[in-house]
Image (spheres, coloured by chain):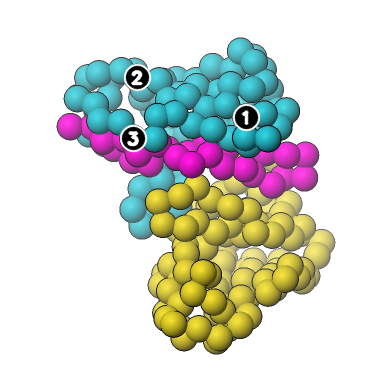
Chain colours: A yellow, B cyan
Amino acid sequence: SQQGEEDPQALSIQEGENATMNCSYKTSINNLQWYRQNSGRGLVHLILIRSNEREKHSGRLRVTLDTSKKSSSLLITASRAADTASYFCAFGSMDSNYQLIWGAGTKLIIKP
Amino acid sequence: NAGVTQTPKFQVLKTGQSMTLQCAQDMNHEYMSWYRQDPGMGLRLIHYSVGAGITDQGEVPNGYNVSRSTTEDFPLRLLSAAPSQTSVYFCASRDFFGEQFFGPGTRLTVL
C-alpha cells in the first residue's frame, strides 16, 4: 500500500506547549498537504508544501519536508485548546497527479 | 459560496437497499472525489472525476457507482448496501493548486 504513515497516533499536551506530528511516505511526491479534522466534521486544509520546498509557515503552523528521508513534520506552536483535533497528512503521488494518498492521522488533545 | 455540500447528513439502510449520496460544489472545480473514512484509518478514495463526463475508480470502488453530468454535481450510488459499507463518506473538490475542499460528511449505517 502507498498509504502514508503518521506518528504519533495520539498526542496529549498542555496548552501553550508545542505539538509536533510526523508523516512518512514511500513514493515520489508532487506535494504534501496537512489537514485538520474536528470531531465529527469534515477536513479542513491547513497547508500545502511542494516537493521542491523545504519549509513553510502559516501562522502558528510550521511544516517541513525532507524528500531524501521521505518525511514531513507539522509543528503547532503555543498550542490552544481549540487545536484539539485529528491531523492528517496527504501527498500527491508522482504516479497519479489526481489522487491524494492519506495517512491514518494523529489525534491531538490539548489539555487546558 | 456554500463550498461543498452533502446530503443527507445521516442515513440508516438495511442490507440490500440502494441509495444515492448527493454532493455539490459551487466553486467551479473540475476535480471531485468521494472518500470513505473508517475508525483508525485515513481516507480511502472510492471514485473521482476530473471533469463533467469523466469518472474513474479509486482504491475501494466495489459496490459504488458515480456519474458526473455537470461540473457542480457528483452523486455516489450504493447499489446494494452491505454492512461493510458502514462508514463516514466525504465528498471533496480540488482547486488548481491542489487544495481539497471537503463537505461535512454523511454518516451511513447499514444494518
> Tag 1, which secondary structure?
strand
Label 2: which secondary element: strand
Q: Residue at the spot x=53%, y=50% of the render? A: A43
- Whether residue A7 is visible here, answered yes or no, is no
Q: Which residue is mark 3?
A: B10
Asked if the residues shown at circle 3 and circle 2 are in contact, with their CB atoms under 8 angstroms apart, the answer is no
Q: Earlier in the sequence, mark 3 or mark 2?
A: 3
Q: In which chain is the residue bearing label 3?
A: B
Q: CA distance from mark 1 to mark 3?
A: 19 Å
Q: Nearer the viewer, mark 3 or mark 2?
A: 3
Q: Amino acid at mark 2?
A: Met
- At 45% from the left edge and 40% from the top edge, which residue is drawn? B105
Span of residues in magenta: B84-111
Q: Answer whether residue A104 is magenta in the image.
A: no
Q: Is B100 part of what is drawn in magenta?
A: yes
Give the x, y percent position of residue B102. 56, 42
Kindly state the secondary structure of the residue where label 3 is placed: strand
The kind of residue on which mark 1 rests is Gln
The answer to whether residue A99 is left or right of residue A43 is right
How far separated are the C-alphas under marks 3 and 2?
12 Å
Q: Chain of mark 2?
A: B
Do the residues marked 2 and 1 share a common chain?
Answer: yes
Q: Amino acid at mark 3?
A: Phe
The tag earlier along the polypeptide, 2 or 1, is: 2
Q: CA distance from mark 2 to mark 1?
A: 20 Å
- Are the residues tagged 2 and 1 within 8 Å (C-beta)? no
Q: Which residue is painted at 55% across and 59% down in the image?
A: A36
Using the image, determine if residue A11 lies above or below residue A41.
below
Q: Residues within 10 Å of mark 1 (few under 14, many from 20)?
A: many
Residue that carries the numbered disc 1 in the rendered image: B25
Q: Quadrant of residue B82?
A: top left
> Which residue is identified by label 2?
B19
